[in-house]
Amino acid sequence: MSSGNSTPLDLVPDPVYQSPVIQMIVNRLMKKGKKTVAYALCYGAMKNIEESTQQDPVQVIEQAIRNVTPNLELKSKRRGGATFQVPVPVSGRRGTALAIRWILTACRKRSGRTMASKLSNEFLDASKNMGAAVRKKEEMAKMAEANRVYSTGRF
C-alpha cells in the first residue's frame, strides 16, 4: 500500500476540461463509488454556469474556490488539561480541499430541485463572494482572530 512517505498522490485531471480542480470536486461529490454520477452532476453544473454567465466554467469554479479558501484554521491543542483552539496557517492543497468541502456542504443544504442546479448556483455565489461557503470562511477567520492569543508567534 503506502511506502511510508507522506507526499500526496498527483491527481489525474478530469477527462473533459483537463483540470485537476474539477477532478477534486468530482471525487468529493462522489457517493458510494459512483463516479459517473458525480461526473454527470459536475458537468451539468458547469453547463449551467456557462449558459448563465457566458464565461469559461472552469475559471468561474476556480475563482469560487479561491474566494472560499481560508488563510487560517483552528486546531485543538491540549495544554495542561485545558483544550485551546489554536489558529494555524492553511497549506495550499489543504485550503483547496477545505474550500471544495465547504462549497459541497453548502450546496447540499441548499433548497432547489436538482443537485446540478444547486451546485452551479453555489459556485456562482462563491465566485461573487456570496453564499454559505463564503460565510463559513468568514466565520473561521473571525474565530481564528478571536483565538489569536493562543497562537505562539505564528502571526
Image (cartoon, helix red, strand yellow):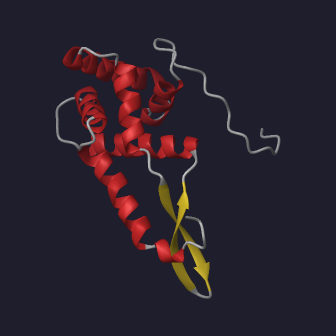
State the residue at coordinates (36%, 64%).
142
Residue 42 showing in the rendered view: no
Task: Tell me if 66 is positioned left or right of 50 in this view.
Answer: right
Residue 132 showing in the rendered view: yes
Tell me the quadrant of the picture where the N terminus can be found: top right
Residue 138 picture location, percent across and down: 33, 55
Residue farthest along the left direction in this orientation: 112
Tell me the quadrant of the picture where the C terminus can be found: bottom right
Residue nearer the viewer, 36 or 73? 73
Task: Tell me if 89 is positioned left or right of 139 in this view.
Answer: right
Q: Quadrant of residue 120?
A: top left
State the residue at coordinates (50%, 20%).
19
Residue nearer the viewer, 148 or 15? 148
- Tell me: residue 71, above or below residue 59: below
Residue 85 picture location, percent across and down: 50, 72
- Tell me: residue 154, above or below residue 14: below
State the residue at coordinates (35%, 41%).
103
Q: Quadrant of residue 64?
A: top left
